[in-house]
């Protein structure tokens, strides 16, 4: 059975909400909520990859594992690959890159993505969910993924494109992208050694580096859409939801 490791890139210097990994919900920092979700999947070892000592200290204080990486990385994928090399963990077939700002991501969706990758023998995978709110189609802060076929829980199609543009006039086979990735180790190594492409730099989407270089990305259907914490408003809204549920 192929082995997967979950690595969580995290840094304090987010442009729109600096310091967000250590913002607290139910008296636990966001990064530790994400770590705990990853552990609940029972997929494999879970480690936070960070450039900040504050994050590493807090993760370890809350029972997690973390490794310190460079502060020069241009994407989360680059960061986790450095972390993976530093860890020197053997017998790993897949690396799952779980975003550190989605503490309410569904554990079942993570497990399903990992299973689909292993069962299909794919090289690179991600998640997307159906768009139920029409405003998402026109929201340029939300990343959408386009496919050539309808996404279902029975398929694992290849992405045609990822974009932030307004899709309000195009409804067919457009889905809300969820920022979680899983790669075969050799594919991640190839990916991080490629130069950033013009489209990646222009749109701020690292997955375009893969598509621009002929690396196919399979997409799995997520049953729920997690709230990413990009702004203070996002944080306060999710804090209210999570603390109410508890």
Image (cartoon, grey):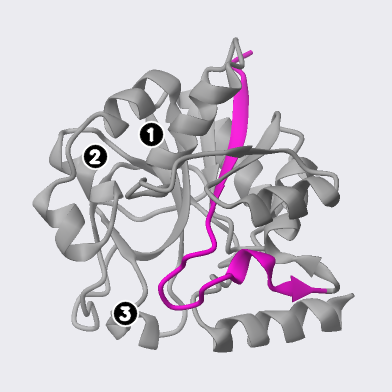
Distance between the Cα atoms at labels 2 and 3?
23 Å
Q: Residue furthest right?
A: 246
Label 2, secondary structure: give it. helix
Q: Nearer the viewer, mark 2 or mark 3?
A: 2
Tell me, yes or no, whether the two marked residues, 2 and 3, touch with CB atoms within 8 Å: no
Q: Nearer the viewer, mark 3 or mark 1?
A: 1
**Where is residue 143 shown, x and y percent of the image?**
34, 67
Range of residues picked out in magenta: 1-25
Q: Find disc 2 in the rendering and name its residue.
A: 210
Distance between the Cα atoms at labels 3 and 1?
25 Å
Task: Give the residue at x 43% y 48%.
Answer: 71
| Mark 1 vs 2, N-terminal side | 1
Question: Residue 28 or 211: which is nearer the viewer?
Answer: 28
Q: Is residue 132 left or right of residue 168?
A: right
Q: Find disc 1 in the rendering and name its residue.
A: 124
**154 to 146, vertically: above or below:** above
**Where is residue 106 shown, x and y percent of the image?**
67, 57
Q: Find disc 3 in the rendering and name its residue.
A: 137
Residue neighbourhood size for the residue with mark 1, other residues' Cα within 10 Å, grouped as few (<14), some (14–19), many (≥20)? many
Task: Give the residue at x 62% y 50%.
Answer: 109
Distance between the Cα atoms at labels 1 and 2?
9 Å
Question: Residue 71 or 189: which is nearer the viewer?
Answer: 71
Tell me, yes or no, whether the two marked residues, 1 and 2, touch with CB atoms within 8 Å: yes
Q: Quadrant of the C terminus?
A: bottom right
Label 1, secondary structure: give it. strand
């Amino acid at each position: 059975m192929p082995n997967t490791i979950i690595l969580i890139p995290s840094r304090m210097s987010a442009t729109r909400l600096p310091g967000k990994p250590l913002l607290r919900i139910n008296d636990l920092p966001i990064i530790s909520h994400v770590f705990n979700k990853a552990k609940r999947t029972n997929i494999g070892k879970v480690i936070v990859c960070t450039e900040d000592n504050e994050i590493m200290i807090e993760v370890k204080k809350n029972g997690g594992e973390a490794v310190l990486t460079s502060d020069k990385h241009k994407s989360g994928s680059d960061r986790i690959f450095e972390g993976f090399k530093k860890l020197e963990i053997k017998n790993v077939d897949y690396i799952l890159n779980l975003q550190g700002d989605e503490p309410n991501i569904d554990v079942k969706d993570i497990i399903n993505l990992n299973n689909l990758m292993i069962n299909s023998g794919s090289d690179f995978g991600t998640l997307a969910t159906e768009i139920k709110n029409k405003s998402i189609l026109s929201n340029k802060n939300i990343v959408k993924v386009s496919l050539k076929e309808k996404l279902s829980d029975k398929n694992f199609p290849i992405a045609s494109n990822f974009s932030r543009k307004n899709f309000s006039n195009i409804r067919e086979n457009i889905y809300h992208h969820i920022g979680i990735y899983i790669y075969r180790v050799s594919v991640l190594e190839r990916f991080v050694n490629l130069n950033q492409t013009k489209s990646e730099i222009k749109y701020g989407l690292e997955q375009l580096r893969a598509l621009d270089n002929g690396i196919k990305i399979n997409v799995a259907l997520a049953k729920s859409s997690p709230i990413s914490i990009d702004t203070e408003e996002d944080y306060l809204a999710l804090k209210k939801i999570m603390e109410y549920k508890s």
